[in-house]
Image (spheres, rainbow, N blue to C red):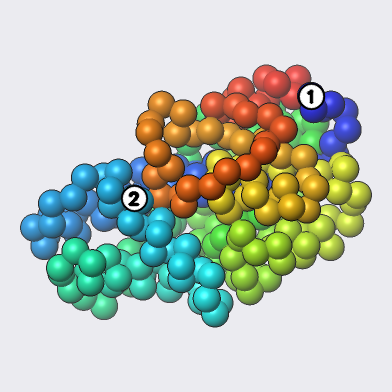
């Protein structure tokens, strides 16, 4: 059982946890698929996207907007269409339009009354700046893939965050939706973790690769986390 008084900082994954990246991805992909007469179910498209994105992120570092743009080209190769360079670039920038989960802004404000808040996210600085505006508050620390030149589940992202926070790991609680990108590496580092199971009403893992991990707490939403921590 987690002791809420133990923690000074909550570190968050952003996309999938605070920002509804699957809704945002599909909103950007669906008109492209329609333009090229590609018939694919949303869940199948998201699963394929997650497979391709995670493979790219495991290679040499690329800016996230480049990763997203490149994945669109790879989706075209898999599904039989050739997106234009402009379509790929626009898709890469669509991250700025991805919506916040409806409970995120209010829950973050509740949590911020008790804890410092940090972001550890697989994203570019400029893309996250747009997402931070959607979330309606300023984070105390922001650690992006662009800053550390790697993508979770690399342990480097967490280790660089520890350097920035300059706190004992026992004072940090990591909060995330992705078992693959976040809870597994956080487990490896001995961090306390919360799994925000945003897909609790949907089968499968969606745009996140399948993984098994052992979070200390499972909640269905950020609002439920604020309740659990007494905020």
> How many C-alpha atoms fall within 10 Å of the one at disc 1: few (<14), some, or many (≥20)?
few
Along the viewing direction, whichever of 24 and 204 lies nearer the viewer:
204
Give the SS element for disc 2. helix
Q: How many marks?
A: 2
Position of 35 compared to 29: left or right?
left
Position of 103 compared to 25: left or right?
right
Position of 73 compared to 213: left or right?
left
Residue at point 65% right, 64% down?
A: 154
Per the rendering, the mark at residue 1 is 1
Along the viewing direction, whichever of 112 and 144 lies nearer the viewer:
144
List x then y, in percent, for residue 170.
88, 43
Per the rendering, the mark at residue 27 is none
Give the farthest residue toward the left.
37
Give the farthest residue toward the front.
212
Per the rendering, the mark at residue 46 is 2
Residue at point 84% right, 36% down?
A: 7
List x then y, in percent, for residue 153.
61, 59
Residue at point 51% right, 55% down?
A: 130
Residue at point 52% right, 76% down?
A: 59
Q: Quadrant of the N terminus?
A: top right
Q: Spatial distance from mark 1 to mark 2, Cα to Cα?
A: 34 Å
Q: Earlier in the sequence, mark 1 or mark 2?
A: 1
Res. 123 in view: yes
List x then y, in percent, for residue 197.
53, 33
> How many C-alpha atoms fall within 10 Å of the one at disc 2: few (<14), some, or many (≥20)?
many
Give the SS element for disc 1. loop
Residue 88, located in which quarter of the rendered image?
A: bottom left
Q: Quadrant of the C terminus?
A: top right
Q: Is residue 107 above or below residue 26?
A: above
Residues marked 1 and 2 touching at CB (< 8 Å): no
Res. 27 in view: no
């Amino acid at each position: 059982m987690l002791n809420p008084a133990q923690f000074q900082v909550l570190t968050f994954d952003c996309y999938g946890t605070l920002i509804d990246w699957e809704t945002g991805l599909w909103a950007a992909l669906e008109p492209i698929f329609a333009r090229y007469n590609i018939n694919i179910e949303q869940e199948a498209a998201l699963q394929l996207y997650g497979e391709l994105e995670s493979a790219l992120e495991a290679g040499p570092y690329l800016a996230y907007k480049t990763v997203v743009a490149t994945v669109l080209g790879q989706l075209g190769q898999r599904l039989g269409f050739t997106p234009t360079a402009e379509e790929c670039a626009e898709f890469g920038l669509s991250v700025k339009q991805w919506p916040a989960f409806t409970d995120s802004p209010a829950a973050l404000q509740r949590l911020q009354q008790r804890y410092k808040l940090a972001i550890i996210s697989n994203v570019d600085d400029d893309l996250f700046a747009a997402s931070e505006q959607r979330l309606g508050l300023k984070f105390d620390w922001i650690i992006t893939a662009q800053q550390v030149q790697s993508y979770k589940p690399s342990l480097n992202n967490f280790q660089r965050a520890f350097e920035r926070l300059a706190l004992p790991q026992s004072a940090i609680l990591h909060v995330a939706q992705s078992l693959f990108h976040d809870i597994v590496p956080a487990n490896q580092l001995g961090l306390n973790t919360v799994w925000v199971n945003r897909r609790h009403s949907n089968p499968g893992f969606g745009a996140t690769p399948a993984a098994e991990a052992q979070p200390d707490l499972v909640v269905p939403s950020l609002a439920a986390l604020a309740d659990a921590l007494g905020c």
